[in-house]
């Protein structure tokens, strides 16, 4: 005797709404647990990059000073590390001292101060994401005066 299997009219052909909601809740919980850790790592990487960039620029400025007996003027800025300034005396410029002047993690050029305003002879700094003085977190100003505070 042969038994035929028949599908009932209401046979399940996919996921129920409850199953979909459970999956969405689980994904949401995972994102809530992993998200803050991921974003914290992004901010940490930005701070480390700022520290490395500022140290590289300061090192190039020191080589510039060895050749030219002074740091670039405020008006010459960091571009003096790439091309000889117009007033370079005696042809002592022996650059370029950098392949290119790096930009901060927020795609803004680093600032340069000569003379420095925070206790250093010269200062290289970024105003953070806000591009305004002050702030906390990604908005904080990082410069040659406080890069040693970067964790």
Image (cartoon, rainbow, N blue to C red):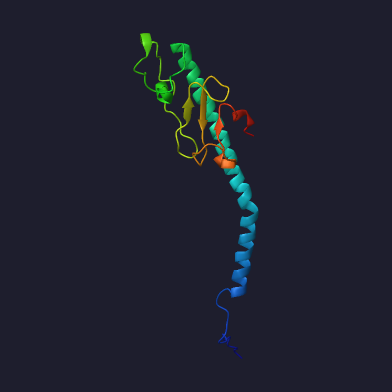
Q: Residue at image x 57%, y 82%?
A: 11
Q: Nearer the viewer, residue 5 or 88?
A: 88
* Residue 97 spot, x, y in % from top left: 44, 20
- Compared with 54, 8 (above or below) is below
* Residue 139 spot, x, y in % from top left: 55, 41
* Residue 103 spot, x, y in % from top left: 46, 34
- Compared with 46, 93 (above or below) is above
* Residue 24 spot, x, y in % from top left: 60, 65
Residue 53 shown left or right of residue 41 in the figure? left
Pick the quarter of the image with the N terminus.
bottom right
Pick the quarter of the image with the C terminus.
top right
Residue 79's image quarter? Answer: top left
Q: Nearer the viewer, residue 69 or 102?
A: 69
Residue 92 shown left or right of residue 59 in the figure? left
- Compared with 107, 62 (above or below) is above
User: Which residue occupies the extreme top position in the image?
Assistant: 90
């Amino acid at each position: 005797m042969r038994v035929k299997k028949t599908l009932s009219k209401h046979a399940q052909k996919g996921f129920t709404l409850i199953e979909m909601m459970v999956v969405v809740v689980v994904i949401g919980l995972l994102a809530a647990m992993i998200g803050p850790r991921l974003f914290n790592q992004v901010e940490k990487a930005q701070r480390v990059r700022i520290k490395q960039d500022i140290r590289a620029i300061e090192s190039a400025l020191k080589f510039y000073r060895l050749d030219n007996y002074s740091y670039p003027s405020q008006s010459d800025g960091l571009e003096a590390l790439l091309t000889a300034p117009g007033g370079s005396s005696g042809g002592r410029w022996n650059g370029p001292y950098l392949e290119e002047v790096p930009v901060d993690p927020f795609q803004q050029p680093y600032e340069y101060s000569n003379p420095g305003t925070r206790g250093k002879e010269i200062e290289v700094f970024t105003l953070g994401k806000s591009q305004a003085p002050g702030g906390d977190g990604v908005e904080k100003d990082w410069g040659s005066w406080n890069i040693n505070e970067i964790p």
